[in-house]
């Protein structure tokens, strides 16, 4: 065990609240996330809640947003902003039943503008929910055993798990563990039931939060489970990743990866994306103790002064990976075994039909940017509802915002296939390989953080890139491209081969060089540029790639070899 | 003696008016006597700065035979008013009486002590009508008394009634008719026949004034009075500022924004007007009169339907105009009046119109008037070769519209803000619009000009600064409360305030939402409740909020709060009134009659004021 006598404890949980950031005091005084949310919900003069309550409601899976397209117009009209709320479902592993799908569909119709958003963390978001409809929405979710606990906030966010349509038994086992991990790691406060279900608080068992205490985590904490060879969940982007080690069809345990995270801030070089480090191997029965050990180290040592520097990745780089690993082992009461070998090949989805090892079928449909909505051209929402009405298996939201209609018995395959055709969903998997490996966050108009368009713009931009691909014979070459409206990185842009992060309306940073299966960060190639410059750069670099690439060389690897960007070996050198 | 058509040498217009007034009331013998009197009065009648008319009249009194009656009778002029027209006329009639040597007491029905009624001797009543045949808001209690069982027999009373109204309403001048009918029932003697005035009362009202003042004079026979002919605007209501209804100030538009957000079922505008340089002043609660012009498209439609030229010369109130101008600025060319139906029935000979005439056709006529505009009628019942002035004879003069001012001079000096709901609807498949609201919506862009005047509203006033106020309003009825709160904020008034506001949808129709939020945050506004009637959440109206908070409402009343109601007269006002009665019954244990007395007392004390339309 490494002893660090000079360990800096000036910014962590050991300090009194007044030495820490203001959010720590807010959390501590919130009566375990109750705050004045009830009063805010009742206030009829505004569609918003108080600033403090907006922060506390994140722990309940709810973000306050407003329609930024009409913010200025409404200000001039002496109307407050068009406030609404985004509610994010807690859906470990992205798995849901057909009846749950139908309920989500109905709730979206009733309260959320008749649209659902699949997310990069395998769940659903309802947007544009009015304050007065929030309780009804939450109670509707409860009816199908879903909730929004800890979908946001300084706690364990939604737990991801690989989709692995091929490996039915392993998927079932890993999914069950992911769900167990989520149920274990979410806050235990009775605030959620009191506020959203209007249950009596009753006898409160002290302490309400045996693990989190009064101040929860320093920042969000993301856990994911991956089953090689797919790295669909981008395990290196998780604070705590578990890489399934399977031998002869049996789950043996997990390699443990710590310290991944995408978020950064422009013009703040002390912030950077970081990929997780694999620190060892645990058997399956050590899973929950390992989660507790790793999370408690971050809980106790994470930076609670500066929220921009509070993710686990910075704690690790500040304290040193060896020290962190030793502290985890100390808390586990035993050293970690050496990591087992594994191999990833891709972080994308396998689209279309796949048969699992149990004989059942799965169909993964590409849903551009995860947006489930009816349009005149495509009745996507109707089609998925029609399928849910007959489907006996499950649905899985993929980590790339697409959807797998899973566990279709052989005799039911034709029925599903017919509906896929009828609603034109089968045709969605046709497009350039770049498009099928694309991902964008929600951004404008609802996200408060967005500086530029993302979901509403990427499809248009892709339509302008596709002629370049065609010209160079790259249409079917899988290349990952991801776009976000801000540098925070909800679509995990910093590990894409091509990435664009918003700086201002119409202006983006352009990155190249991410690893095709999520194993390497990319690096900025151009800063703060508009569409003509972006297209010009892509024409040049893609054209060069088409001519000069080596056999099976991915675009991200080429961009580094050809010298367009330097290779980033560690997150802290991302900004160099 | 008739009025003379020219003024004498060197007389001021004021002098000339007085002489005119006197002249029309004199019998020939009296006039003869007076001419001699003036001829002989000599230089002693001249004041230091010339001929002093007042001095002359005072001198004349002790000697002349037509001075105050030997058997002096008391004269009370009683008025009921919404917009101040009746009050203005009441003062004018009192002034005219005074010139006859008769001292009149002018009284607002709102303040009139009804127990005095049995002692009245001569009573002149001037009242407007509100909504469908109702009294003005402030006069409701007086009407209730007069029409109720407690009204005394009035065998010794002489009276005359001047009724003001608006012929677009079916129950035209009904307020005056009710008083006239009831006083007769109570045994009083009618001095002169009731006169009903349409919105353009500046001819009929002075005539009535002259007639009744003449009859008040102690004479053996009123039948010998010389018939009078008058000229328009010989007598106009007293004015106190340079600009008024007849002479509006041309205000420049500062801003004109739509308050209702996207997706609203309404269009409600906030319009800021500059009063700079006008000298106009107003108090919170007052209204602004807006002199609109008709939609040019409607004018063109009327002209084209009748094949009339826009530049045809016409004479309107002795002014030469083109027909196009007259239809744009001088006459109502949208809403139909019973008078127009009569007129057009005669011109067209259309049986369908003729069938709508007469009192027994009231309902059918009302429905027809709702469903047809002027242009619809002239198209449906064509009249060939009609002359321009024949058309104009059937039309009613274009009237200014009144809007509660939604600002306070204390907060925005030299400005008046309006909160205007644009009236738009379809009739017979064609889009139509309210005259003034669409004029403001379409015409009143920043830097455009709008003719305006101030219309005082003394029955809607803030109390002293430390008194609590409970403001109830729906839709644009919130306008005066914005003025109230601006005023109270500027004065740092200490009294509590509670606003109950209703509209259709929270998201789009919460008028001035951010302003109320700021006032609440700054504790200028103590409390606010809102009711939205078309949201998915249980629909609610302002009276529902009052009922839900009945204990607080009653407590506020008991603690001296002044209560205000502004908005729709047909539903809001009666619903709120009934709810207040229920609240008083429920919270105080009074029975219904006592609760009614309680509210009536509030009304008498000016603690329950309404501005409804």
Image: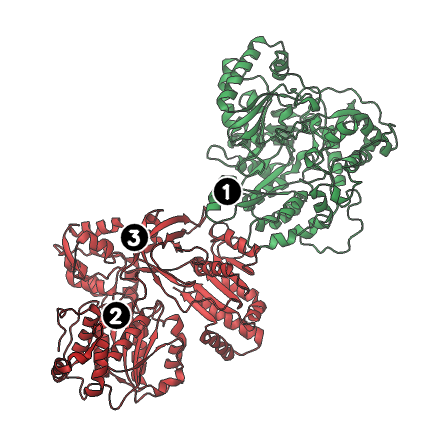
Chain colours: A green, B red
Chain for mark 1?
A: A
Q: Quick one: label 3, few (<14), some, or many (20+) residues within 10 Å? A: few
Q: What separation in Å lies between label 2 and label 1 (alpha carbons)?
A: 51 Å
Residue B420 point in image, percent of width and height? 39, 55
Give the quarter of the figure containing the N terminus of chain A: top right
Residue shown at 86% from the left, 27% from the top = A2
Asked whether residue B192 is in view, the answer is: no
Same chain assignment for discs 3 and 1? no
Give the quarter of the figure containing the C terminus of chain A: top right
Q: Which residue is mark 1?
A: A71
Residue B304 point in image, percent of width and height? 19, 49
* Residue A487 shown left or right of residue A249 in the figure: left
Residue A229 point in image, percent of width and height? 71, 21
Going from the N terminus, do you reach mark 2 or mark 3 first?
2
| Badge nearest the viewer, 3 or 1 | 1
Residue B227 point in image, percent of width and height? 14, 77
Nearer the observer, A20 or A47: A20
Same chain assignment for discs 2 and 3? yes
Q: Is residue A35 above or below residue B200?
A: above
* Residue B293 shown left or right of residue A188 in the figure: left
Q: Report helix, strand or loop for mark 3.
A: loop
Tell whether label 1 touches label 2 (CB within 8 Å). Answer: no
Tell whether label 1 touches label 3 (CB within 8 Å). Answer: no
Q: Which residue is mark 3?
A: B428
| Badge nearest the viewer, 2 or 3 | 2
Q: Report helix, strand or loop for mark 2.
A: strand
The answer to which quarter of the image holds residue A559 is top right
Q: Which mark is drawn over residue B197?
A: 2
Asked whether residue A260 is in view, the answer is: yes
Same chain assignment for discs 2 and 1? no
């Amino acid at each position: 065990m490494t002893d660090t006598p000079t360990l800096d404890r000036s910014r962590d949980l050991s300090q009194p609240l007044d030495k820490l950031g203001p959010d720590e005091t807010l959390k501590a005084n919130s009566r375990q996330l109750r705050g004045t949310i009830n009063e805010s919900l009742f206030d009829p003069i505004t569609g918003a809640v108080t600033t403090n309550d907006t922060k506390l409601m994140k722990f309940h899976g709810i973000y306050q947003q407003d329609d930024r397209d009409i913010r200025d117009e409404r200000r001039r009209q002496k109307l407050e902003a068009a406030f609404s709320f985004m509610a994010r479902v807690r859906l470990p592993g992205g798995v849901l039943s057909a009846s749950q799908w139908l309920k989500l569909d109905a709730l979206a119709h009733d309260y959320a503008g008749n649209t659902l958003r699949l997310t990069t963390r395998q769940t659903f978001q309802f947007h544009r929910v009015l304050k007065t409809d929030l309780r009804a929405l939450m109670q509707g979710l409860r009816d199908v055993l879903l909730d929004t606990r800890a979908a946001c906030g300084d706690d364990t966010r939604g737990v991801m798990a690989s989709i692995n349509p091929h490996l039915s038994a392993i998927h079932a086992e890993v999914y069950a563990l992911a769900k167990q991990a989520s149920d274990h790691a979410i806050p235990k406060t009775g605030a959620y039931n009191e506020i959203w279900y209007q249950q009596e608080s009753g006898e409160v068992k002290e302490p309400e939060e045996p693990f989190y205490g009064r101040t929860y985590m320093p920042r969000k904490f993301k856990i994911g489970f991956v089953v090689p060879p797919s790295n669909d969940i981008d395990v290196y982007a998780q604070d705590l990743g578990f890489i399934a080690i399977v031998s002869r069809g049996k789950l043996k345990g997990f390699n443990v990866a710590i310290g991944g995270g995408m978020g950064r801030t422009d013009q703040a070089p002390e912030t950077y994306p970081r990929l997780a480090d694999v620190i060892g191997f645990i058997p399956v029965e050590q899973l929950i103790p390992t989660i507790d050990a790793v999370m408690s180290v971050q809980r106790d040592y994470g930076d609670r002064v500066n929220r921009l520097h509070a993710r686990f990745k910075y704690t690790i780089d500040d304290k040193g990976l060896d020290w962190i690993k030793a502290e985890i082992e100390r808390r586990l009461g035993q050293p970690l075994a050496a990591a087992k070998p594994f191999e990833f090949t891709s972080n994308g989805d396998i689209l279309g039909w796949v048969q699992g090892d149990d004989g059942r079928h799965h169909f993964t449909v590409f849903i551009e940017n995860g947006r489930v909505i009816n349009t005149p051209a495509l009745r996507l929402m109707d089609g998925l509802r029609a399928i849910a009405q007959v489907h006996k298996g499950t649905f899985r939201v993929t980590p790339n915002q697409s959807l797998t209609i899973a566990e279709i018995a052989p005799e039911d395959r034709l029925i599903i296939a017919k509906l896929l055709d009828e609603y034109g969903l089968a045709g969605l998997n046709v497009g350039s390989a770049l498009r099928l490996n694309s991902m964008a966050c929600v951004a404008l108009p609802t996200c408060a953080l967005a500086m530029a368009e993302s979901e509403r713009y990427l499809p248009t931009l892709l339509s302008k890139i596709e002629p370049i691909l065609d010209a160079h014979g790259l249409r079917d070459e899988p290349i990952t491209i991801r776009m976000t409206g801000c540098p925070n990185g909800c679509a995990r842009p910093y590990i894409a081969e091509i990435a664009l992060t918003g700086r201002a309306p119409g202006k983006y940073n352009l990155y190249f060089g991410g690893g095709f299966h999520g194993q390497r960060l990319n690096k900025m190639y151009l800063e703060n540029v508009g569409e003509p410059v972006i297209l010009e750069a892509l024409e040049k670099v893609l054209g060069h790639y088409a001519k000069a690439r080596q056999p099976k060389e991915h675009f991200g690897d080429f961009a580094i070899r050809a010298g367009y960007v330097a290779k980033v070996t560690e997150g802290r050198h991302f900004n160099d | 003696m008739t009025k003379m058509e020219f003024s004498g040498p060197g007389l001021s217009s004021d002098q000339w008016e007085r002489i005119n007034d006197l002249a029309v009331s004199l019998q020939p013998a009296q006039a003869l006597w007076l001419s001699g009197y003036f001829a002989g009065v000599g230089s002693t009648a001249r004041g230091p700065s010339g001929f002093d008319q007042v001095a002359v009249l005072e001198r004349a009194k002790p000697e002349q035979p037509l001075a105050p009656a030997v058997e002096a009778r008391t004269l009370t002029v009683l008025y009921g008013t919404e917009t101040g027209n009746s009050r203005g006329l009441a003062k004018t009639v009192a002034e005219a009486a005074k010139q006859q040597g008769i001292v009149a007491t002018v009284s607002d029905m709102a303040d009139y002590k009804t127990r005095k009624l049995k002692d009245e001797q001569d009573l002149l009543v001037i009242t407007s009508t509100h909504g469908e045949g109702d009294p003005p808001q402030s006069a409701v209690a007086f009407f209730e008394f007069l029409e109720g069982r407690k009204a005394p027999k009035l065998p010794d009373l002489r009276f005359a009634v001047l009724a003001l109204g608006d012929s677009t309403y079916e129950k035209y001048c009904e307020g005056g008719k009710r008083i006239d009918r009831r006083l007769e029932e109570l045994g009083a003697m009618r001095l002169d026949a009731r006169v009903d005035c349409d919105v353009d009362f500046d001819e009929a009202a002075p005539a009535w004034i002259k007639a009744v003042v003449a009859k008040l004079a102690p004479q053996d026979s009123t039948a010998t009075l010389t018939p009078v002919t008058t000229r328009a605007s010989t007598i106009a209501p007293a004015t106190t500022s340079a600009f008024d209804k007849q002479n509006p100030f041309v205000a420049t538009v500062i801003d004109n924004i739509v308050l209702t957000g996207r997706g609203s079922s309404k269009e409600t505008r906030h319009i800021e007007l500059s009063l700079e340089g006008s000298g106009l002043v107003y108090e919170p609660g007052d209204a602004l009169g807006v002199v609109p012009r008709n939609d040019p498209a409607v004018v063109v439609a009327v002209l084209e339907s009748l094949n009339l030229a826009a530049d045809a010369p016409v004479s309107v109130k002795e002014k030469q105009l083109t027909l196009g101008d007259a239809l744009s600025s001088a006459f109502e060319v949208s809403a139909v009046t019973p008078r127009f139906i009569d007129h057009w029935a005669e011109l067209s000979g259309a049986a369908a119109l003729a069938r709508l005439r007469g009192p027994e056709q009231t309902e059918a006529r009302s429905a027809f008037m709702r469903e047809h505009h002027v242009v619809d009628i002239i198209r449906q019942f064509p009249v060939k070769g009609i002359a321009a002035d024949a058309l104009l004879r059937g039309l009613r003069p274009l009237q200014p519209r009144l809007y509660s001012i939604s600002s306070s001079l204390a907060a925005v000096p030299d400005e008046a803000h309006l909160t205007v709901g644009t009236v738009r609807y379809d009739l017979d498949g064609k889009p139509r619009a309210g005259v003034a609201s669409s004029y403001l919506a379409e015409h009143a862009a920043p830097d455009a000009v709008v003719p305006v005047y101030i219309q005082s509203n003394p029955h809607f006033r803030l109390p002293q600064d430390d008194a609590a106020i409970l403001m109830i309003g729906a839709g644009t009825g919130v306008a005066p409360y914005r003025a109230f709160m601006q005023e109270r904020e500027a004065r740092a008034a200490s009294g509590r305030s509670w606003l109950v506001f209703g509209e259709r949808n929270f998201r789009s129709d919460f008028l001035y939402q951010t302003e109320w939020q700021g006032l609440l945050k700054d504790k200028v506004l103590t409390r606010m409740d809102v009711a939205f009637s078309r949201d998915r959440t249980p629909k609610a109206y302002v009276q529902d909020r009052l009922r839900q908070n009945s204990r607080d409402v009653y407590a506020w009343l008991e603690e001296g709060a002044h209560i205000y109601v502004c908005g729709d007269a047909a539903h809001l006002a009666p619903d709120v009134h009934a709810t207040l009665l229920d609240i008083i019954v429920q919270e105080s244990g009074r029975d219904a009659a006592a609760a009614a007395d309680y509210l009536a007392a509030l009304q008498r004390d000016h603690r329950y004021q309404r501005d409804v339309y």
